[in-house]
Image: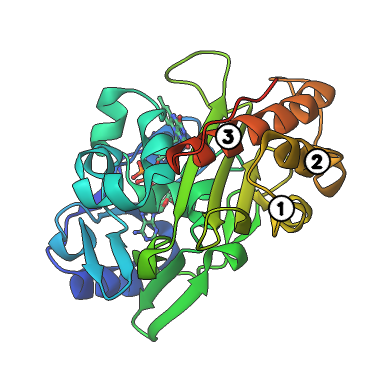
Amino acid sequence: MKDVDYFKPASLAEALELKRGLGEGAVFLAGGTDVMVRSRQNKIAPQALISLRGIAELRGARLEGESLLLGAATTLSGILADPLIAQHLPVLTDAARVMGSTQMRNVATVGGNVMSAAPSGDTLCPLLCLEAVCHLVSPEGARQVPMHEMFLGPRRTAARPGEVLTHLAIPLPTAGGQASAGAFLKLSRRAALDLALINLAAQLWLNPDGTRIEKARLAAGVVGPTPLRLTEAEEALTGALPTAASLERAAQGLGNSCSIRDSHRCAAWYREEMLRVLLLRAGALALQRLGLSLEVAA
Ligand SMILES: Cc1cc2nc3c(=O)[nH]c(=O)nc-3n(C[C@H](O)[C@H](O)[C@H](O)COP(=O)(O)OP(=O)(O)OC[C@H]3O[C@@H](n4cnc5c(N)ncnc54)[C@H](O)[C@@H]3O)c2cc1C
């Protein structure tokens, strides 16, 4: 790796000005767990690094109205330690818990995971299910991109050059006393320090008397060039009984709506089969978290 200039601005305004002045050779750095690895692999060659780590306004979570605002530079350990996130967004806590190692979770950020846009990114499916909105800022102004419009391809996002992701606005699934719970599951060859062979998040809402699934949000990773919402399965669950049989029906033919491929890490047929299994298990876990007792055969 060549020598690079390193900047550590103390404010967002300073970071944006630096980026504007330095141009496309300058790269934002959050935890650096993607940037540094890809630089050493010569996949990117930044001339300057602009660290976002000294910018307090990009870190932490707070409630605002019926949304949780999650700073982009919040580390995965920060997510795990946050009682608000544990209480309202267990689907995101599930994902942060299985990412990398303790050392990596102490520096890697949720914003870095989103902006890296890897098909296997573990926080991406939970954020898709939670219908998070990305807040982006550049010297030209601020704008918002819904999570389902954020991913354009492997490692390509809808963010424009020079934009910083400041935070994610996440509508609380339990707003207005709604019965909602989520779960995230990841299949990998090792329990730690391994990317997902496939991952899946489910967020389910029950109707007021708890007898039907009122709304379902499902998303899977490594089933195509970007993480994908599983809209056909969501529709199959909407209005269905909260049972294992409903989950089984929704999981049928799931692979048809994805573009699952063989890779050096795993065969397509196995990914397709495990997509079904993860949906059954994550759906069951979400319903168990809502106090329902059900078992799935898979
Ligand atoms: C050993 C190891 C294990 C890993 N395990 C996992 C895993 O289990 N699951 C998983 O999903 N990933 C994993 N990763 C990948 C990586 O750690 C994650 O994607 C992580 O969340 C990246 O965050 P970061 O803060 O380190 O990003 P950085 O490397 O700092 O940045 C990544 C990209 O995002 C941009 N960026 C960062 N923050 C912002 C912002 N606020 N605004 C605009 N652009 C920004 C950077 O310019 C860069 O392009 C692993 C990596 C390593 C090295």
- Residue contact between numbered discs 3 and 1, judged by CB atoms under 8 Å: no
C-alpha span from label 3 to label 2: 13 Å
Residue 24, percent from left and from top: 45, 64
For this orientation, the residue located farthest to the top is 190
Find numbered disc 1 in the image and state the secondary structure of the residue it sits on.
loop
Residue 244 visible (yes or no): yes
Q: Earlier in the sequence, mark 3 or mark 1?
A: 1
Q: Determine whether, in the image, residue 5 is placed left or right of residue 170.
A: left
Identified at 15% across, 68% down, the residue is 11
Identified at 32% across, 39% down, the residue is 108
Residue 34's label in the rendered image is none
Give the residue type at disc 2.
Answer: Arg
How many C-alpha atoms fall within 10 Å of the one at disc 1: few (<14), some, or many (≥20)? Answer: many
Find numbered disc 2 in the image and state the secondary structure of the residue it sits on.
helix
Q: Determine whether, in the image, residue 62 is placed left or right of residue 185.
A: left
* Ligand 1 sits in quadrant: top left
Q: Quadrant of residue 162?
A: bottom left
The residue carrying mark 3 is 284
Identified at 78% across, 21% down, the residue is 270
Q: Determine whether, in the image, residue 69 is placed left or right of residue 130.
A: left
Nearest to the observer: residue 197 or residue 225: 197
Give the residue type at disc 1.
Answer: Ala
Find numbered disc 3 in the image and state the secondary structure of the residue it sits on.
helix
Identified at 30% across, 59% down, the residue is 70
- Residue contact between numbered discs 1 and 2, judged by CB atoms under 8 Å: yes
